[in-house]
Image (cartoon, rainbow, N blue to C red):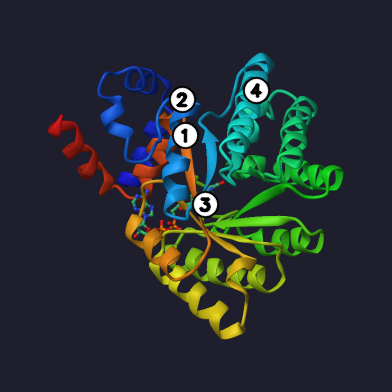
Amino acid sequence: MLRSTLLYFSRQSWLRHWIETSSVSRRLTSRFIAGRTLEDGIRVAGQLAKDRIFATLDFLGENVTSLDEALRSRDSYLEALEAIEQHSLGATVSVKLTQLGLNLSEEACLNNVSALVERAVATDSRIEVDMESSAYTDRTLRLVTELHTRFGGHVRAVIQAYLRRSEEDIRRLSAAGIAVRLCKGAYREPSGVAFQIKADVDRNYLKLMKLLLEGGVYPAIASHDEVILRECARYVRASGIEPDSFEFQMLYGIRRDLQKELTSDGFRLRSYVPYGDAWYPYFMRRLAERPANLLFIAKNVLRG
Ligand SMILES: Cc1cc2nc3c(=O)[nH]c(=O)nc-3n(C[C@H](O)[C@H](O)[C@H](O)COP(=O)(O)OP(=O)(O)OC[C@H]3O[C@@H](n4cnc5c(N)ncnc54)[C@H](O)[C@@H]3O)c2cc1C
């Protein structure tokens, strides 16, 4: 109930405008968001690198309403790739296709994201294409496949374990040699397309995770679920899978204890580091995942 309410509020533009411009917003968000600028993102990525954690930088934004706005997002990501190279961070960037114009023109979006992959090839980085709601799954996978064919890698797709179609998608992507990040899924989806019960999502996650570890291309296991992480560690050890043939991924600021544990155990870890002004929908999805975060945020604000 609280989760649905938070997801409902995540789509309300009046609340978004009020809260994004409010003076308390910095205190609200600092746990989960690096800051408002690319410099903030790079600073946090540098701090993480000292702890042997890689970063994937996310310039916050989704669903742009003009192609000019989509071009500005592309340019922000080009700057991010440049800064990553300058600072030798070994980081990637994570993009949302609706931020690069997918809703306005699939062709323009492909051109925008092609420019990014081209730069990623030149700087030995990677473009990780986040997955949005199921309305975008087909188009997103189509574009990622096209990019992979054009550039011979340097791109990663995201698959959501809550979607019933995901096993088929993973088999197809792996056969084509396309890298995959596996996550549970963060959007509200109807029961026809997505498992609704956590136990079913978790079961499917474990099944898909093993499929990727056995036959995928440098998969990313993206989760904070202790049961999943421990099963992954147990499985790779038991199967003799090399620890550098995959990576774990977690969101910046979440389960820092587990992040430390994984790197101490010799696993590769990448932290998803968001920065930028348009933080509201991202932030609200994190609250919806764990409404107990509301308490944590309230304490931060009261502390001043
Ligand atoms: C690197 C990365 C990239 C992602 N990319 C996408 C994407 O492209 N598309 C998409 O739909 N989703 C994406 N997600 C979000 C994902 O789908 C889940 O919504 C989110 O990760 C929560 O699922 P979980 O696996 O952590 O498990 P859950 O079962 O939700 O949580 C397990 C445990 O993790 C901790 N936890 C989880 N979330 C939080 C939180 N917000 N705050 C504090 N503790 C928390 C809690 O201890 C919780 O008990 C991504 C997640 C990660 C880590």
Beta carbon at label 3 within 8 Å of ligand 1: yes
Local SS, label 2: loop
> Of tags 4 and 1, which is closer to the observer?
1
The reply to whether callout 3 and callout 1 are in contact (CB within 8 Å) is no
Give the Cα distance between marks 2 and 4.
14 Å
Amino acid carrying mark 1 in the image: Gly
N-terminal label among 2 and 4: 2
Residue beneath disc 2: 37
Most foreground residue, 116 or 144: 116
Query: Does label 4 or label 1 sit earlier along the sequence?
Result: 1
Of the numbered discs 3 and 1, the one sitting upstream in the chain is 1
Callouts 2 and 1 close, C-beta under 8 Å: yes
Q: Which numbered disc, 4 or 3, marks the residue closer to the eye? A: 4
Considering only order in the chain, which callout, 3 or 2, is on the residue closer to the N terminus?
A: 2
Distance between mark 4 and mark 3 Cα atoms: 28 Å
- Disc 4 is placed on an element classified as helix
The answer to whether marks 2 and 4 mark residues whose Cβ atoms lie closer than 8 Å is: no
Q: Report how far apart the C-alphas of labels 4 and 1 lie in the structure.
A: 16 Å
Residue at image mark 3: 185
Against 281, residue 150 (above or below) is below
User: Quick check: 231 above or below 125?
Assistant: below
Within 10 angstroms of label 4, few (less than 14), some, or many (20 or more) residues? some
Q: Which residue is mark 4?
A: 75
Q: Percent from the top left, x then y, of residue 294?
A: 25, 42
Where's the C terminus, which quadrant?
A: top left
The kind of secondary structure element at disc 3 is: loop
Give the numbered dot on residue 41: 1
Q: Position of residue 166 (x, y in %)?
A: 65, 59
Amino acid type, callout 3: Gly
Quarter where residue 32 is shown = top left
Horizontal side of residue 118 vs 13, given as left or right: right
Q: Position of residue 217 (x, y in %)?
A: 71, 62
